[in-house]
């Protein structure tokens, strides 16, 4: 028992839980902020109403929701959120579309590039991946699916999981089958 305590175990578990919760809140706040650009009244803005409902589902505090609405409505100084789309090629030549919301595109692109290179994936030029997809109902759908080996599929899953865990990333689309 020497050197171990119940408190240190609880503290570590609380830290892990708080980090996950913070990440969920961060994504919800970005969705609210972006939706609030179209109007800060949930009654007149269905996108904002939907984003607020999703935030409430994850028990996001009302203060955080209000701050995100003000941020999106431009009532907080110096903050500008934008939608961005990155394109990449992953293991086995799989095409990947990454949609994100960020207040600092330079930071986000650097972080995404780092994740891609860490998994031997390549950042692609704008338009070099989207040609293989069609935009349907707000979702990207692959025109042609690509079959990859089991080994590449495992690598792809790890890559997509890490990218999806990024705070700014909202959606991922691939053409893998």
Image (tube, rainbow, N blue to C red):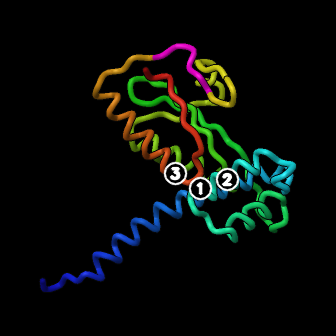
Q: Name above or below for residue 98 compared with residue 105.
A: above
Q: Position of residue 102 (x, y in %)?
A: 66, 52
Q: Position of residue 31 (x, y in %)?
A: 68, 51
Image side of residue 65 versus residue 159, left or right: right
Estimate the spatial distance between the alpha carbons at disc 1 and disc 2, rounded to whole Å.
6 Å
Which comes sooner in the sequence, label 3 or label 1? 1
Q: Position of residue 15 (x, y in %)?
A: 40, 71
Q: Quadrant of the N terminus?
A: bottom left
Would you call the spot at circle 3 few (<14 residues within 10 Å), some (14-19), or many (20 or more)? some
Estimate the spatial distance between the alpha carbons at disc 3 and disc 1, rounded to whole Å.
20 Å
Residue in the image at 72% along x and 62% along y: 68
Q: Which region of the structure is painted magenta?
A: 140-145
Would you call the spot at circle 2 few (<14 residues within 10 Å), some (14-19), or many (20 or more)? some
Q: Name above or below for residue 158 compared with residue 61.
A: above
Would you call the spot at circle 1 few (<14 residues within 10 Å), some (14-19), or many (20 or more)? few
The residue singled out by tag 2 in the image is 53
Q: Secondary structure at mark 2?
A: helix
Estimate the spatial distance between the alpha carbons at disc 2 and disc 3, rounded to whole Å.
22 Å
Q: Are marks 1 and 2 in contact (CB under 8 Å)?
A: yes
């Amino acid at each position: 028992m020497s050197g171990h305590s119940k408190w240190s175990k609880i503290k570590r578990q609380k830290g892990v839980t708080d980090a996950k919760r913070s990440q969920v809140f961060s994504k919800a706040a970005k969705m609210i902020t972006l939706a609030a650009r179209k109007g800060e009244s949930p009654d007149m803005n269905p996108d904002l109403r939907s984003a607020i409902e999703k935030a409430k589902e994850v028990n996001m505090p009302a203060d955080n929701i209000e701050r995100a609405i003000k941020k999106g409505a431009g009532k907080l100084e110096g903050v500008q959120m934008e939608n961005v789309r990155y394109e990449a090629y992953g293991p086995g030549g799989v095409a990947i579309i990454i949609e994100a919301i960020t207040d600092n595109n330079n930071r986000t692109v650097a972080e995404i590039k780092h994740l891609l290179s860490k998994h031997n994936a390549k950042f692609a030029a704008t338009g070099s991946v989207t040609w293989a997809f069609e935009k349907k109902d707000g979702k990207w759908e692959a025109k042609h699916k690509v079959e990859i080996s089991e080994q590449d599929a495992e690598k792809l899953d790890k890559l997509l999981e890490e990218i999806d865990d990024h705070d700014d990333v909202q959606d991922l689309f691939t053409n893998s089958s």
